[in-house]
Image: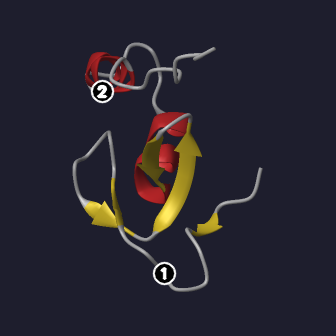
């Protein structure tokens, strides 16, 4: 998976984890996670005090519904 500009026009989006407006990051279903939060989450151990916060924030990410 490649992390980069949201598109060539550098559209900013709000990160679901930190709530800041960023231009670089990834999309997870319909949510955006900035590159800084992604890197910090990858490095966070399960015994780190930040770990429960990341879990709470990631619970906001939901798969889009299937409409028929």
Query: Is 46 placed left or right of 8 in the picture?
Result: left
Q: Which residue is nearer to you in this view: 39 or 6?
A: 6
Per the image, label 1 sits on a secondary structure element best described as loop
Q: Please report the residue visible at 52 percent of the width from the left and 48 percent of the height from the top.
A: 39
Crowd rating for badge 2 (residues with CA inside 10 Å; few <14, some 14–19, many 20+): some
Quarter-wise, where is residue 34 in the image? bottom left
| Distance from the alpha carbon under mark 1 to that under mark 2 | 24 Å
Of all residues, the one furthest to the bottom in this rendering is 9
Mark 1 or 2, closer to the camera? 1
> What residue is shown with label 2?
57
Where residue 49 sits: x, y (%)?
A: 26, 21
Asked whether the residues under the numbered discs 1 and 2 touch, taking CB atoms below 8 Å apart as contact, a structural biologist would say no
Quarter of the image containing the C terminus? top right
Q: Which residue lies furthest to the right in this view?
A: 1
- Identity of the residue drawn at 60% across and 16% down: 66
Residue 60 vertical position relative to residue 18 in the rendered view, above or below? above
Image location (x, y in percent) of residue 2: 74, 58
* Location of residue 44 (image quadrant): top left
Q: Mark 1 points at which residue?
A: 10
Residue drawn at x 30%, y 26% is 57
């Amino acid at each position: 998976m490649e992390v980069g500009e949201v598109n060539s026009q550098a559209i900013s989006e709000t990160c679901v984890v930190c709530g800041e407006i960023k231009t670089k990051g990834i999309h997870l279903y319909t949510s955006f996670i900035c590159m800084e939060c992604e890197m910090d989450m990858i490095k966070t151990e399960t015994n780190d005090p930040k770990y429960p916060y990341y879990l709470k924030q990631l619970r906001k990410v939901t798969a889009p519904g299937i409409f028929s």
